[in-house]
Image (cartoon, rainbow, N blue to C red):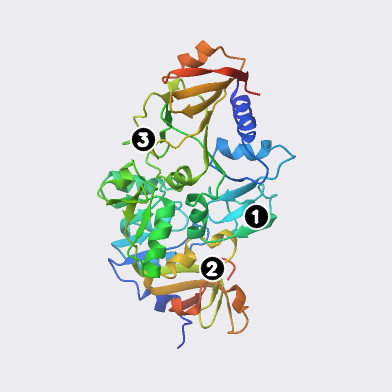
Amino acid sequence: MNKISTVDQAIAKIEDGMVVMIAGFLGCGTPETFIDALIEKGTKDLTIICNDTAFPDKGIGRLIVNKQVKKVITSHIGTNPETGRQMNEGEMEVVLTPQGTIAEQVRAAGAGLGGVITPTGLGTVVEEGKQIIEVKGRKYLVEEPLHADIALIHAEKADTKGNLVYEYSATNFNPLMAMAADTVIVEAEHIVEVGDLDPNFIHTPHIFVNMIVKGGHNG
Amino acid sequence: MDKHEIRRVIATRVAKEFRDGDLVNLGIGLPTLVANYVPSDIDVTFQSENGFIGMGSAPEAGEENKNLTNAGGQPVTILKSAAFFDSAMSFAIIRGGHLDCTVLGALQVDSKGNLANWMIPGKKVPGMGGAMDLVTGAKKVVVAMEHTARGAVKILTECNLPLTAVGVVDLIVTEMGVMKVTDKGLVLIEYNPQFTIDEIQAVTEAKLIVDENLKEML
């Protein structure tokens, strides 16, 4: 099974209207190769699940500026004024969710859990429309799992089978999102042979990965 | 006091809250400055919620690494003892009671320890980021902020902006004083002698209970 792909082969998997997870934290650890390609192709009406909408000229923010996003589930939009503008004008739906909750919702989807129960957001607008349950005398919000059609991942190293290693704070949502989508597409700065990575230090095991594209800013 | 002095006073006082061995998360802006005032005789580890502990100072020009940024997206350095992890681990640390102290700014805070710091409806909606998790999970929540916002009162009887969390704030540190949230309300435990108690109360909507052991703050 050859997972090494071209950008075009990878982007062909992403159709209009799909739910796409894109990893990264204010652009750090975001696979920019795929952002470039999505902008070039013009894929539209996407639902994006991400930590934040980055900046107008960096990361996920560029897809929003280019009006390719119908809905975004995210924790922070403050660094990208265009997200706020499209939200206020009713052009795009924005679901603001606490960062730790998104992380666990994504993990839950990948781990086969029916959701997570968290105290975060109790007594705030975040609890609106959600079930509240009590466990051992303490209240929690029920948050459903977040699954996607596609996950777009940035890794520092991948072997040809798909074992992944991330670097520093570019890790963030990458390992979680790599578990929570039907098709997982990786941009790797370096692609190495099977056996070149120490199996004790693999962050994402290869079974989660479907396609690997050589790319990234060190590539 | 000028802006620089206000920030120095607040950051210096907040840093005194830390104990040897603490894990601390500092918010963006004024709270970030607190790292510069940690007493040299204690060992404090800083967490960056984008996925590591052991955060150091800003890098020298030319030493930036694009894969190593703080939670504000700025390049940063790490200590030799640093450790990296994913966002689920990062928030397990935060939510799971492993974080000794979080220091954040506020738009409003009130006498019940309610905090509003993530949106102004119709005006500014940046999102909550990690703030809701931080104040829900940290063992101690310290609000570090200027006492008023260009004259507008921020320490209220009851917040009227959308809340970040209910009843979570432990301590409020401003350039005018230090207030502790208690069952009875806000207790002024320290004050800046540049101001009188009346002057502090005049710019505080919540009724301040003056501690019987009231001290100077620095």
The answer to which of marks 1 and 3 sits earlier in the sequence is 1
Q: Is residue B34 left or right of residue A204?
A: right
| CB within 8 Å, label 3 to label 2 | no
Residue position marked by numbered label 3 in the rendering: B120
Chain letter, disc 2 residue: A
Do marks 3 and 2 share a subunit?
no
Q: Is disc 2 surrounded by few (<14), some (14 to 19) or many (20+) residues within 10 Å? A: some
Q: What residue sits 33% from the left and 46% below the top?
A: A126
State whether residue B117 is above or below residue A121.
Answer: above
Identify residue type, mark 2.
Answer: Gly
- Viewer-side label of 3, 2: 3
Residue position marked by numbered label 2 in the rendering: A216
Q: Is residue B69 left or right of residue B119?
A: right
Q: Give the quadrant of the N terminus of chain A.
A: bottom left
State whether residue B122 is above or below residue B138.
Answer: above
Q: Secondary structure at mark 1?
A: loop
Q: Secondary structure at mark 2?
A: loop
Residue position marked by numbered label 1 in the rendering: B64
| Residue farthest to the front, as pictured | A136
Identify residue type, mark 3.
Answer: Ile
Q: What residue sits 49% from the left and 79% below the top?
A: A206
